[in-house]
Image (cartoon, rainbow, N blue to C red):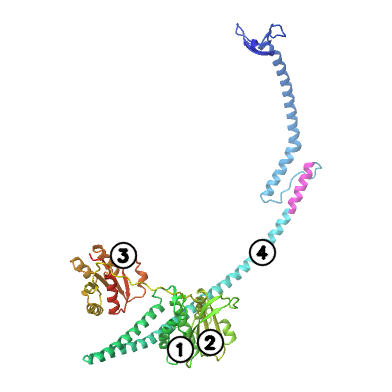
């Protein structure tokens, strides 16, 4: 079929009837062949036998010649190539191991390997010389490093000893200054509080003697109240100075701060120092940390007192200024409040003035100062976006000025007074549960609330209050002290609201730092009002009325 279908001559392999493989060549029947096909067949093995025999003979001849040539080549290479190469490799291994004294053999021969061995040996000699030179230089460097290291150890030991001594000295000086400042402050405050107590006790005694004279009682009551308010102002400033209040930057009226600070400084600095305040009304507010500013001003006032050993005048001045572009002091363009602390003391010479702002630099005797006051003042002023300047001359006193950025004064819209909702509980007939562990304070607060028209139930501690509530006490609002033994005010509010979720509450506290510790929203569900002691009866009654006026009747 392949023959008949093909158009060109070809060959194919066929198995004949006797099972013999034959190789057949053929020419197909075409028109040119007049339809005649030519076929020639050979037995394949007989045809290829002579070819295979001739091919095998050629392979044997070529293989034998190649083996003979390879053997002769190996003999020659081992004698003239492998042996010199092995000798060079052994020498190179010894050089790599650090034995530069090793030499390659055969360097005296005039062959290529002899010349190569000679070059390698010369290289080894040069490397050996370099190594000896480097070893010598390394030894010299080690000796020098050891000497310098020993010197540095000794210097470092001396420096550490000096640093430790200076740190101990600074700690002792700082502690001494703290003790001195506490003693002076305590003396001044004790003097001021003695005046307050004198007014209160004297007024109470006079009221007792003139109980039948309403006009005298009213006048004496006003005097006692004024003295108590002055004591309240002193305690608030002490708490702010001791950082028991939340210290954060806020709108600050510098003029009012200086006027209030004068009370503390006048008693602390002594009678020989006259404290004056000069501040125009309606100063723009500044955005600063009140506690830090008060601390800075007290430190500066203390320094001024030490510079006026025979007494003098301390002036606290505040004034608005405007800084234009290109200020030589580096202040940004804008409005500032310039706070100046000026004294009439001995002043400073140029050398002392140049170092006055350095930390730990002080001209005071040992144990009377650490030199941190001016450094803290400079840090506060720059941290608030301003700067500090010092002007002083011997015999002319010192002026220290703080530049604080002023805030823009914006008119605040008056808050609308909300009208009570329909069904609100009448405030003046409400039932108040009052909890305080101080009997005198509890009695005063209860009397004030009763005078305002409230029905008051008293409890001496948190456990007693919870027992009253559990017994079904009718209560519209809870007024509690914060710091009490056992159950404190926050815990009391939380436990009370488990049974009465809508119960309004007021916390009264005498500690200025409690607001941060309360963690409002985390320890107590719902809102409450915080009032700081001393609180007047009118303030407490108004706060109760404000809370009850918005509570829906249950």
Q: Quadrant of the C terminus?
A: bottom left
Q: CA distance from mark 1 to mark 2?
A: 15 Å
Which SS class for mark 2? strand
Query: Which residue is at the far left?
Result: 471
Q: Residue at x 75, y 51 (%)?
A: 123
* Residue bearing the label numbered 3: 526
**Residue pointed to by mark 2:** 398
> Principal SS element in the magenta part?
helix
Task: Determine which of the numbered discs, if any, sits on residue 141 in the image.
Answer: 4
The answer, for residue 488, to whether it is visible in the render is no
Q: Earlier in the sequence, mark 4 or mark 3?
A: 4
Q: Would you identify the image quadrant in which residue 83 lies?
A: top right
Q: Residue at x 71, y 51 (%)?
A: 101
Magenta-drawn segment: 112-126
Marks 1, 2: nearer the viewer? 1
What label does residue 276 carry, if any?
1
């Amino acid at each position: 079929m392949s023959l008949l279908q093909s158009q060109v001559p070809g060959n194919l392999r066929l198995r004949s009837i006797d099972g013999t493989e034959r190789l057949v060549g053929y020419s197909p029947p075409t028109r040119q062949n007049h339809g005649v096909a030519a076929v020639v067949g050979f037995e394949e093995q007989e045809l290829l036998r002579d070819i295979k025999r001739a091919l095998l003979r050629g392979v044997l001849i070529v293989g034998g010649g190649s083996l003979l040539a390879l053997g002769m080549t190996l003999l020659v290479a081992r004698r003239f190539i492998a042996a010199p190469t092995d000798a060079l490799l052994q020498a190179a291994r010894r050089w790599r191991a650090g034995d530069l004294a090793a030499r390659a053999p055969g360097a005296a021969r005039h062959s290529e390997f002899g010349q190569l061995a000679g070059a390698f040996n010369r290289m080894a000699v040069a490397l050996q010389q370099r190594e000896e030179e480097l070893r010598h230089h390394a030894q010299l460097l080690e000796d020098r490093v050891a000497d310098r290291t020993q010197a540095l150890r000794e210097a470092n030991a001396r420096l550490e000893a000096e640093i430790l001594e200076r740190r101990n000295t600074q700690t002792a000086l700082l502690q001494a200054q703290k003790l001195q400042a506490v003693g002076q402050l305590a003396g001044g405050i004790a003097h001021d509080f003695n005046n307050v107590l004198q007014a209160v006790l004297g007024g109470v005694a006079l009221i007792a003697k003139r109980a039948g004279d309403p006009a005298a009682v009213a006048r004496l009551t006003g005097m006692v109240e004024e003295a108590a308010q002055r004591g309240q102002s002193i305690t608030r400033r002490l708490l702010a100075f001791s950082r028991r209040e939340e210290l954060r930057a806020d709108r600050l009226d510098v003029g009012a701060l200086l006027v209030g600070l004068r009370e503390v400084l006048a008693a602390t600095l002594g009678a020989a120092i006259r404290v004056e305040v000069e501040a125009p009304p309606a100063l723009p507010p500044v955005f600063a940390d009140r506690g830090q500013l008060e601390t800075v001003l007290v430190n500066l006032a203390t320094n001024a007192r030490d510079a006026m050993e025979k007494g003098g005048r301390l002036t606290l001045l505040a004034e608005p200024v405007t800084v234009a572009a290109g200020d030589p002091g580096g202040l940004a363009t804008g409005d500032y409040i310039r706070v100046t602390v000026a004294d009439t003391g001995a002043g400073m010479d140029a050398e002392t003035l140049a170092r006055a702002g350095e930390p730990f630099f002080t001209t005071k005797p040992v144990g009377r100062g650490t030199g941190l006051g001016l450094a803290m003042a400079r840090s506060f002023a720059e941290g608030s976006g301003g700067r500090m300047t010092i002007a002083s001359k011997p015999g002319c006193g010192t002026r220290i000025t703080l530049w604080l950025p002023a805030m823009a004064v914006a008119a605040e819209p008056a808050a609308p007074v909300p009208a009570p909702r329909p069904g609100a509980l009448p405030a003046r007939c409400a039932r108040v549960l009052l909890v305080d562990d101080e009997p005198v304070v509890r009695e005063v607060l209860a009397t004030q609330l009763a005078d305002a028209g409230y029905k008051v139930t008293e409890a001496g501690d948190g456990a007693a209050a919870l027992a009253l509530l559990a017994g079904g006490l009718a209560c519209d609002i809870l007024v509690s002290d914060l710091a009490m033994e056992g159950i404190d005010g926050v815990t009391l509010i939380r436990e009370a609201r488990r049974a009465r979720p809508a119960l309004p509450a007021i916390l009264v506290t005498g500690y200025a730092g409690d607001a941060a510790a309360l963690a409002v929203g985390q320890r107590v569900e719902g809102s409450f009002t915080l009032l700081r002691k001393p609180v007047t009866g009118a303030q407490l009654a108004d706060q109760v009325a404000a809370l009850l006026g918005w509570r829906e009747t249950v």
